[in-house]
Image (cartoon, grey):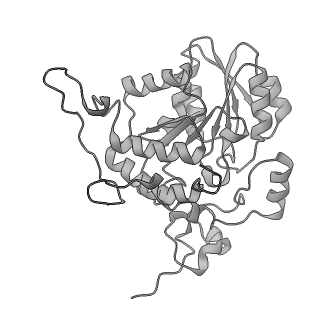
């Protein structure tokens, strides 16, 4: 297809990749709740090779296909929570590996590293957001397997230059994993900037309706490390439920409309963003669900389906 015929990300999202039921023409997919699948009596084969929902389920695969397309990745996995998704790469590490990790990121990741990684024989070296020299000092060539960045970082909204971090990580033989929960693929596509993995707490902006707990990881390459992560999900079982997968797709359908109506950055944060060569992010004072955010929210002039705009949005007029 030519560039003119390739659907834009907004189209891919709102149409959920253009899924359509061949028999009925329905454009909203059903929820596939079956946990197991019928086998052929003679060959013991299953339709499409599915055996058990913990390994592969249609509703989960549809959600994965949508987020994979939006991030421009090679493969994707959905999980039962954001913390399950964002710790999945850490479960793929082996004894003796090391992680270079931001000091200021979502507290659950820091807590996981503190409680478990040392006991597993995995070292952690910390650096500050935006401190590329500190990152260069934190990585250990031949030992550091993952550089972990969250940008914009929770809760400070601090920005780290993804492309520069990727260059440092790859020079040391490490992968760059980016938690892009706050930005979503609407504002940042880390894989295009050099990241190897991108994760989301889909509970937040990716779903956007405050009614799903979910997580997702997208990889640039379906390589050996990714297959190890897949085995972790298969044997440990942190899979997303079918109904939650359906709701997540529903949320991603209006992701572009919702995320582009979030508050514009302040002059100071915009200067910082430009200096970091990063994507535009919301102002650090625009905390979801607060009155201060509502006062700044450009969506306050109309009804909005996104949960973080609900404080400032006016109620739709009665029919």
User: Residue at the location (19% across, 22% down)?
Assistant: 44
Q: Look at the picture and state if 162 lies above or below 19.
A: above
Quadrant for residue 139, please give it: top right
Query: Is 118 drawn above or below residue 64 in the view shown?
Result: above
How many marks are shown on the rendered structure? 0
Choose between 97 and 76: the one closer to the eye.
76
- Residue 68 placement (x, y as % from top left): 53, 42
**Residue farthest to the left?**
41
Residue visible at 77% across and 48% down in the picture: 278
> Could you say where residue 21 lies in the image, as x and y percent from the top left?
32, 54
Question: Horizontally, is 66 left or right of 281 in the view?
Answer: left
Taking the view exactly as shown, the residue that stands out farthest to the front is: 1
Q: 187 or 152: nearer the eye? A: 187
Quarter of the image for residue 52 reads top left
Q: Is residue 182 visible in this depiction of the protein?
A: no
Residue 101 visible in image: yes
Q: Position of residue 260 (x, y in %)?
A: 63, 64
Above or below — where is 282 with respect to 70?
below
Q: Is residue 213 above or below residue 288?
A: above
Q: Residue 171 sits in which quadrant?
A: top right
Q: For the C terminus, which image quadrant?
A: bottom left
Of 108 and 29, which appears nearest the observer?
A: 29
Judged left or right of residue 83, residue 147 is: right
- The residue positioned 55% from the left and 76% from the top of the image is 313
- Residue 287 is situated, as x and y percent measured from the top left of the image, at 63, 60
């Amino acid at each position: 297809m030519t560039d003119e015929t390739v659907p834009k990300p907004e189209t891919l999202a709102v149409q959920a990749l253009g899924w359509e039921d061949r028999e009925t023409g329905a454009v909203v997919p059903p929820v596939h709740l079956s946990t197991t699948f019928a086998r052929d009596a003679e060959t013991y084969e299953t339709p499409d090779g599915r055996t058990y929902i913990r390994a592969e389920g249609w509703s989960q695969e549809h959600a994965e296909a949508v987020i994979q397309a939006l991030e421009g990745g090679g493969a994707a996995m959905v999980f039962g929570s954001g913390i399950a998704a964002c710790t999945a790469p850490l479960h793929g590490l082996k004894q003796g590996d090391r992680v270079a990790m931001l000091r200021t990121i979502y507290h659950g990741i820091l807590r996981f590293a503190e409680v478990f990684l040392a006991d597993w024989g995995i070292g952690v070296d910390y650096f500050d957001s935006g401190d590329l020299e500190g990152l260069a000092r934190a990585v250990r060539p031949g030992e550091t397997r993952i550089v972990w960045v969250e940008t914009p970082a929770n809760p400070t909204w601090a920005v780290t230059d993804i492309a520069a971090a990727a260059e440092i990580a790859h020079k040391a033989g490490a992968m760059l994993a980016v938690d892009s929960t706050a930005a979503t693929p609407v504002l940042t596509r880390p894989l295009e900037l050099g990241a190897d993995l991108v994760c989301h707490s889909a509970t937040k902006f990716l779903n956007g309706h405050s009614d799903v707990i979910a997580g997702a990881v997208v990889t640039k390459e379906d390589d050996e490390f990714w297959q190890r992560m897949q085995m972790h999900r298969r044997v440990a079982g942190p899979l997303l439920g079918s109904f939650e997968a359906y709701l997540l797709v529903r949320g991603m359908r209006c992701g572009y409309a919702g995320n582009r109506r979030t508050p514009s950055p302040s002059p100071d944060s915009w200067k910082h963003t430009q200096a970091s060569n990063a994507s535009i992010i919301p102002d650090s004072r625009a905390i979801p669900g607060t009155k201060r955010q509502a006062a700044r929210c450009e969506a306050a002039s109309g009804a909005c389906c996104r949960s973080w705009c609900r404080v400032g949005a006016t109620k739709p007029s009665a029919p």
